[in-house]
Image (cartoon, rainbow, N blue to C red):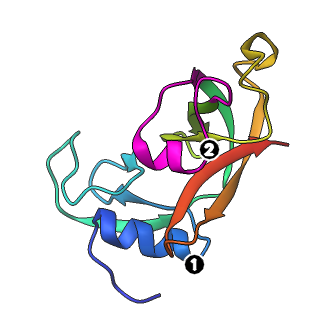
Amino acid sequence: MEERPFSDISFEKYLNEEKLMGNRCKQCNALFIPPRPICIACHSTDMNWVEMSGKGKLSAYTCISIGPSFMRAEGYDRHNPYCSGVVELEEGARVDARIEGVDPKEPENINVGMSLRVKFLHREDHKTYLAFEPV
């Protein structure tokens, strides 16, 4: 695997390749996603890339009716909300992402603790967005 800096740009490049990557501190074993150049636990810069399984559980979520302009451009609004959540990965790290395959108009049917798997959303702007869907 080529060496890439621990940055948002590298993280996005991996998403374009349909890889969910984080980084682990070699000193204290702390895991981060998205990656960080400096460990917030022990302040080490001795890090390495780790590929995540893409499996996890929903820790928290919210259904959004009034979102940012790029989400409105995708057709989300008061009548068509979307779901965003925090996913705890099998590896232990947590990541924020869009939650697909659920009905944000009926949030009472979305369950914290439900099993999820990664989904890569490829858009026309040549950008890939991170999402998860129920297993």
Q: Position of residue 32 (x, y in %)?
A: 38, 49
Tell me: residue 132, above or below residue 94: below
Numbered disc in front, either 2 or 1: 2
Question: Number of marks in the image?
Answer: 2
Tell me: residue 64, above or below residue 56: above
Q: Position of residue 46 (x, y in %)?
A: 22, 65
Q: Label 2 to label 1, Cα distance in Å? A: 26 Å
Closer to the N terminus: mark 2 or mark 1?
1
Q: Secondary structure at mark 1?
A: loop
Q: Secondary structure at mark 2?
A: loop
Write down the region rendered in magenta: 60-81
Callout 2 crowding tier (Cα within 10 Å): few <14, some 14–19, many ≥20: few
Residue highlighted by disc 2: 75
Q: Position of residue 34 (x, y in %)?
A: 39, 53
**Residue at figure coordinates x 78%, y 16% from the top left:** 106
Residue at the farthest top position: 108
**Residue at figure coordinates x 23%, y 39% from the top left:** 41
Residue type beneath disc 1: Glu
Q: Are marks 2 and 1 in contact (CB under 8 Å)?
A: no
In depth, the one of 89 and 135 nearer the eye is 135
In depth, the one of 67 and 23 nearer the eye is 67
Residue type beneath disc 2: Gly
Residue highlighted by disc 1: 17
Task: Using residue 2 as the reference point, say whether residue 21 is left or right of it.
Answer: right
What mark, if any, has residue 41 been given in the picture? none
